[in-house]
Image (cartoon, helix red, strand yellow):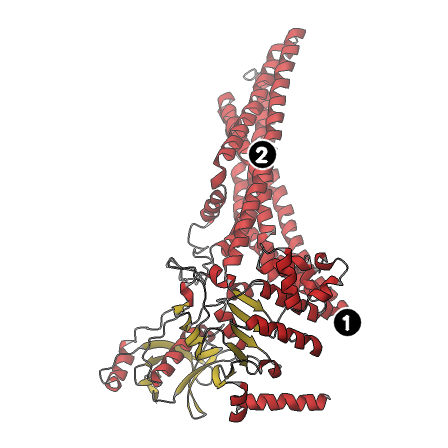
């Protein structure tokens, strides 16, 4: 993303006397007046010492970048604001549309750094992919669907899928050619049978039997090869579909949480399952017949030309009209099918949401409301599907009529040729048979664009995932090392949206074996610090060091293998209790699993379950109570024997007695291990070596429980507020 636009000559001349030899660090446009009306392009220019707002042919505002000055970028409903502030006083500098939001947010951050004496150059982590031909911003894929290859790109992707199956594809193609040759040969045999045996009726029973056996042999050959072809195509389609699903699923696992959270679950499921299934259907139902039809059409047309080229042209006279009809309506049909699949994604996503949240639906008595909403979604899908099928049901009969007109003219003029003696009855029968063999493939070809459209659209949706570049990569220098436990946050800044930082300039050093408590109001950035440490996201600015080495130098597999995590939202997979505990360490034995469960105070309740450790917990573990799920999650973390331990509200779902037991277990577990613990119940952090208070996206306080209580700052206020709540509750 460009943060260094070239300033127009007029504005540059206007600003030059103010620069005093300085060069602009950032120069970006804005496009709204303070009242929110679109205006001719204005400019934001930042040097090492000042920020300038240019517009209306003059310098509108000048903001010296002095210590204590903060340049802020604020997102509103329909626009963004750039402001400057010192000591709680904010001044509006300019307004801009949302398309400039990300760019100007980086400029604001860079200007704030300069005001604080930090001359680091802020660079955008956003990478806009723009088509060099049409200027279109590309969404997920690196190729422009409008310019790069168009339809040919879909075929290239299809052959890419088939790359590892060259021999089966070749054999299927050869069988198709033999089947076509057999079908064409039958008509030649039939012609001789009519002319030499039936007309006039001068043949013998032996000739009839010979022709019968030849026709039977050709028919059996075609049938056997067609069945074999269908079986092989089915096998090939299922294998390609399996491989494609595996590729998409692996890619989804590699993609960042920011990408996955921006997509609906139902949409992603459709791309893994339904779109891959459409590829399989194409291989089974279309590819198996496609070359047979093409070979048959080519051979039949050749034989028709040999018999009577004028009648061959007559038979094809109306085919161009049919092809023009298909071509004219093809683009509209493609648009309709795209709409259908988008609505289908929404239906699946809504279904997944309701089923996943069925307890909430039932708790609030919203069954009827959700039924109506789902009926609305399915009604829209039905309307689009009906419109698509009506469109095709109207188009295809028109194409069929155009194709059939040629055969009627062939019968009419062919009858004259037979009566005149220029064509034998057998030749006419053979010619009409070839005409039928020609119109059948032509009808198939007229339907082929619809089939190919379904294939290419599914491939586009699949490759939208496969072409997505992972934001988190290990890099060529990624190493696998054993973590000792020293952690450092070095001027870390991060935001899930680049223009809304969640953490700003976080500096924290943690020694091996320390337990760090993270507290602060909701949304302050506590869980975000944990996410960055687990490298679920990469920092925007600064770096995180593990044992003195950048976190990005370590392979993610090595990092996650040495981290034990108990998240605030406890998730259990469908399966047994035993499998859920062993998930963190698949090679663990029964003794290790039981020992981990005992340390998490879970063994006692597990043994009381109907099947003990083999009890099936159901999807998300909803057959267990919240506290039971939490203890299984703690056992899962304990089993991993982590070097780093992360506890995100690890005891939030436990009663007082169980919490005390778990705290003892966690005390043994955290001994000698670097631990980060988030807790809203502040009493659970009394034994933390240090408590870090995060407020307004920054570290506001840091110290032990006693130190922070004596300081009587934010932490003291949080503790006293909780004590008051307990008094009121009691």
Residue 514, x across and y down, in percent: 49, 76
The numbered dot on residue 600 is: none
Q: Are marks 2 and 1 in contact (CB under 8 Å)?
A: no
Q: Label 1's element?
A: loop
- In percent of the image, x 42 and y 65: which residue is there? 552
Mark with earlier residue (2, 1): 2
The numbered dot on residue 232 is: 2
Where 7 sits versus 53, above or below?
above
Q: Give the Cα distance between marks 2 and 1.
A: 52 Å
What is the quadrant of the N terminus in the image? bottom left
What is the quadrant of the C terminus in the image? bottom right
Left or right: residue 174 versus residue 474 is right
Residue 57, x across and y down, in percent: 32, 83
State which quadrant residue 623 falls in.
Answer: bottom right
Residue 372, x across and y down, in percent: 73, 66
Where 644 sits versus 342, above or below?
below
State which quadrant residue 110 falls in.
Answer: bottom left
Q: Residues within 10 Å of mark 1 (few under 14, many from 20)?
A: few
Q: Nearer the viewer, residue 54 or 117?
A: 117
Q: Residues within 10 Å of mark 2 (few under 14, many from 20)?
A: some
Numbered marks: total: 2
The numbered dot on residue 365 is: 1
Left or right: residue 648 versus residue 157 is right
Q: Nearer the viewer, residue 315 or 545?
A: 545
- In percent of the image, x 73 and y 66: which residue is there? 605
Q: Nearer the viewer, residue 611 or 3?
A: 611
Residue 608, x across and y down, in percent: 76, 63
Q: Is residue 710 visible?
A: yes
Q: Label 2's element?
A: helix
């Amino acid at each position: 993303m460009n943060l260094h636009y070239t300033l127009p000559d007029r504005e540059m001349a206007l600003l030059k006397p103010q620069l005093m030899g300085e060069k602009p660090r950032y120069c970006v446009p804005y496009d709204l007046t303070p009242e929110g009306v679109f205006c001719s392009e204005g400019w934001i220019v930042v040097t090492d010492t000042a920020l300038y707002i240019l517009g209306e042919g003059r310098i509108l505002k000048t903001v010296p970048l002095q210590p204590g000055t903060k340049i802020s970028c604020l997102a509103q409903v329909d626009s963004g604001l750039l402001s400057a502030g010192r000591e709680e006083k904010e001044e509006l500098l300019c307004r801009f549309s949302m398309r400039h939001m990300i760019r100007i947010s980086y400029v604001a951050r860079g200007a704030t750094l300069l005001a604080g004496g930090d001359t680091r150059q802020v660079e955008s982590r956003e990478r806009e992919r723009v088509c060099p031909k049409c200027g279109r911003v590309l969404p997920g894929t690196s190729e422009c669907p409008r310019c790069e290859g168009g339809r040919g790109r879909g075929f290239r992707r299809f052959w890419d899928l088939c790359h590892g199956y060259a021999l089966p594809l070749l054999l299927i193609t050869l069988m198709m050619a033999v089947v076509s040759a057999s079908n064409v040969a039958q008509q030649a045999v039939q012609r001789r049978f009519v002319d030499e045996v039936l007309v006039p009726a001068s043949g013998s029973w032996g000739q009839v039997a010979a022709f019968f056996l030849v026709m039977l042999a050709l028919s059996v050959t075609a049938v056997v090869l067609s069945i074999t072809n269908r079986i092989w195509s089915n096998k090939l389609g299922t294998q390609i579909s399996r491989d494609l699903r595996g590729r998409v699923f692996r890619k989804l696992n590699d993609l960042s949480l920011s990408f996955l959270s921006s997509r609906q679950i139902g949409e992603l499921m459709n791309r893994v399952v339904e779109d891959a299934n459409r590829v399989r259907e194409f291989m089974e139902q279309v590819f198996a017949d496609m070359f047979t039809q093409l070979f048959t059409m080519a051979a039949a047309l050749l034989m028709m030309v040999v018999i009577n080229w004028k009648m061959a042209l007559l038979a094809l006279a109306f085919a161009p009209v049919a092809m023009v009809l298909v071509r004219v309506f093809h683009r509209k049909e493609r648009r309709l099918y795209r709409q259908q699949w988008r609505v289908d994604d929404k239906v699946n996503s809504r279904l997944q949401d309701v089923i996943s949240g069925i307890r909430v639906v039932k708790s609030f008595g919203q069954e009827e409301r959700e039924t109506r909403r789902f009926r609305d979604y399915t009604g829209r899908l039905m309307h689009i599907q009906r419109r698509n099928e009506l469109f095709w049901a109207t188009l295809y009969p028109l194409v069929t009529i155009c194709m059939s007109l040629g055969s009627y003219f062939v019968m009419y003029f062919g009858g004259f040729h037979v009566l005149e003696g220029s064509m034998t009855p057998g030749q006419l029968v053979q010619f009409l048979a070839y005409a039928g063999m020609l119109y059948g493939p032509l009808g198939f070809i007229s339907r082929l664009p619809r089939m190919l459209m379904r294939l290419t659209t599914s491939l586009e949706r699949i490759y939208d995932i496969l072409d997505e570049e992972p934001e988190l990569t290990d890099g060529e220098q990624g190493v696998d090392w054993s973590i000792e436990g020293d952690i450092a946050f070095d001027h870390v800044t991060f935001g899930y949206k680049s223009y809304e930082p969640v953490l700003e300039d976080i500096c924290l050093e943690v020694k091996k074996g320390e337990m760090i408590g993270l507290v602060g109001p909701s949304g302050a950035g506590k869980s975000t610090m944990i996410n960055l440490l687990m490298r679920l996201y990469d920092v925007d600015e600064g770096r995180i060091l593990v044992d003195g080495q950048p976190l990005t130098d370590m392979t993610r597999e090595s990092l996650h293998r040495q981290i034990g995590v108990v998240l605030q939202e406890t998730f259990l997979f469908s399966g047994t209790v035993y499998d859920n505990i062993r998930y963190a360490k698949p090679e663990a034995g029964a003794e290790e699993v039981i020992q981990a469960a005992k340390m998490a105070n879970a063994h006692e309740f597990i043994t009381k379950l109907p099947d003990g450790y083999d009890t099936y917990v159901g999807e998300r573990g909803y057959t267990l109570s919240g506290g039971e799920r939490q203890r299984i999650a703690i056992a899962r973390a304990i089993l991993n024997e982590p070097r780093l331990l992360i506890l995100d509200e690890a005891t939030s779902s436990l009663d007082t007695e169980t919490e005390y037991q778990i705290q003892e277990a966690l005390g043994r577990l955290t001994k000698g291990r670097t631990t980060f613990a988030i807790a809203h119940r502040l009493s659970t952090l009394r034994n933390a070596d240090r408590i870090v208070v995060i407020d307004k996206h920054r570290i506001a306080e840091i110290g032990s429980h006693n130190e922070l209580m004596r300081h009587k700052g934010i932490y003291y206020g949080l503790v006293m507020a909780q004590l008051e709540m307990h008094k009121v509750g009691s």
